[in-house]
Amino acid sequence: MIRHSKLKHSIRKKMNQHTAIIEKFYTAFSTKDAVTMASCYHDNIQFQDPVFGILKGKKVMAMWQMLLERSKGNLQVEFSKVTSDETTGSATWVATYPFSKTNRKVINTIKASFEFKDGLISKHTDVFDLWHWSRQAFGIKGLLLGWTSFMQQKIKTQAAQGLNAFCKKQGL
């Protein structure tokens, strides 16, 4: 009985630690604190979303730094529904910002899922509707073409080029 109780306590403690690390990450994101955001990630972090695809290691933090810099302080981040267990977690977050290329207001609701290793986030996956995002970011062009693979691939290519240029500038 004591053994079972200790196991339940250990699981609860991990759940609390994992919830805390997710909350720490998004709190840092909302205050534009890239250093604290990075401290929440495992060295072997893998990130994935509909725009950047799969990123690994230092490129993940370079992406967040680039997005924070491009926002010029005009990024608002809110998060909710943070949950976790001993190995995984999830959250919902909303990013509100003017899209840098068009200055159009974007409100993007994202479902995030996480995996943990050594008490840190080792895998971070963001899911959102790219067509919905493109309608906000590009207006009528996004409405009419944002659902097409051509337009979505163009968005992904431009994001990859922007990130690669940022990484080169940062010496990564």
Image: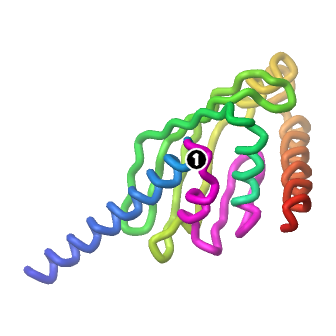
The residue lying toward the viewer, choosing from 163 and 81, is 163
Residue at 41%, 48% in the rendered image:
82
Magenta residue span: 31-60
Indicate the quadrant where residue 57 lies.
Answer: bottom right
Residue type highlighted by circle 1 = Phe
* Direction top: furthest residue: 140
Residue at 45%, 62% in the rendered image:
88
Residue 91 x/y as whole percent: 47, 47
Indicate yes or no whether the magenta region holds residue 156.
no
Q: Is residue 12 left or right of residue 64?
A: left
The residue lying toward the viewer, choosing from 89 and 68, is 68
Indicate yes or no whether the magenta region holds residue 53.
yes
State whether residue 109 is above or below residue 170: above
Image quarter (top left, top right, bottom left or bottom right) of the C terminus: bottom right
Residue at 75%, 54% in the rendered image:
63
Colour scheme used in the picture?
rainbow
Residue at 69%, 50% in the rendered image:
49
Under tag 1, what secondary structure?
helix
Mark 1, residue position: 29
* Direction bottom: furthest residue: 3
Residue 138 x/y as whole percent: 83, 24
